[in-house]
């Protein structure tokens, strides 16, 4: 329980810092919040992609440690006769 609370708190602090970057851009450089938040989202995706493919990679494997077999059954169709995902 303590680990989950700590993870939530660290996530909130990190999100606040990430939001502060957009606020600082607005305040000091007069950058539009919509544009800066969209660009910060792309930066976050690139950083997390880098972490997954390098830092979180298992040294004994050539691919990331996030195995595709884990996700294989996650997106089955709810009903076989529909095209819903």
Image (spheres, helix red, strand yellow):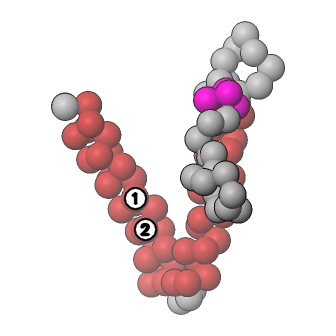
Q: Which mark is residue 48?
A: none
Residue drawn at (59%, 67%), measured in percent from left and top?
40
Where disc 1 sits, the SS reads helix
Q: Single out the residue that lies furthest toward the right.
A: 62
Say which residue label 2 marks: 19
Say which residue label 1 marks: 15
Along the horizontal axis of the image, is 59 left or right of 31?
Answer: right
Helix, strand or loop for the magenta stretch, by majority: helix
Q: Single out the residue that lies furthest toward the top.
A: 60
Q: Quadrant of the N terminus?
A: top left
Locate residue 29: give its quadrant.
bottom right
Q: Quadrant of the C terminus?
A: bottom right
Q: Position of residue 51 (x, y in %)?
A: 63, 37
Residue drawn at (66%, 18%), measured in percent from left and top?
58
Q: Which residues are magenta?
A: 66-71
Residue drawn at (59%, 41%), measured in percent from left and top?
74
Q: Is residue 29 visible?
A: no
Residue drawn at (55%, 84%), measured in percent from left and top?
34
Residue 21, relative to residue 5: is it above or below? below
Q: Position of residue 32 (x, y in %)?
A: 56, 88
The residues tagged by marks 2 and 1 sit, at their Cα atoms, a distance apart of 6 Å
Along the horizontal axis of the image, is 54 left or right of 34?
Answer: right
Where disc 2 sits, the SS reads helix
> Closer to the camera, 6 or 26?
6
Q: How many marks?
A: 2
Q: Is residue 77 visible?
A: yes
Assess whether mark 1 and mark 2 are in contact (beta carbons under 8 angstroms).
yes
């Amino acid at each position: 329980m303590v680990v989950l609370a700590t993870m939530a708190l660290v996530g909130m602090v990190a999100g606040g810092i990430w939001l502060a970057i957009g606020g600082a851009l607005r305040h000091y450089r007069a950058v539009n919040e919509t544009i800066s938040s969209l660009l910060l989202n792309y930066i976050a995706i690139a950083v997390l992609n880098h972490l997954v493919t390098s830092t979180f990679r298992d040294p004994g494997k050539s691919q990331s440690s996030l195995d595709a077999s884990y996700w294989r059954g996650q997106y089955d169709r709810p009903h076989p006769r529909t095209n819903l995902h």
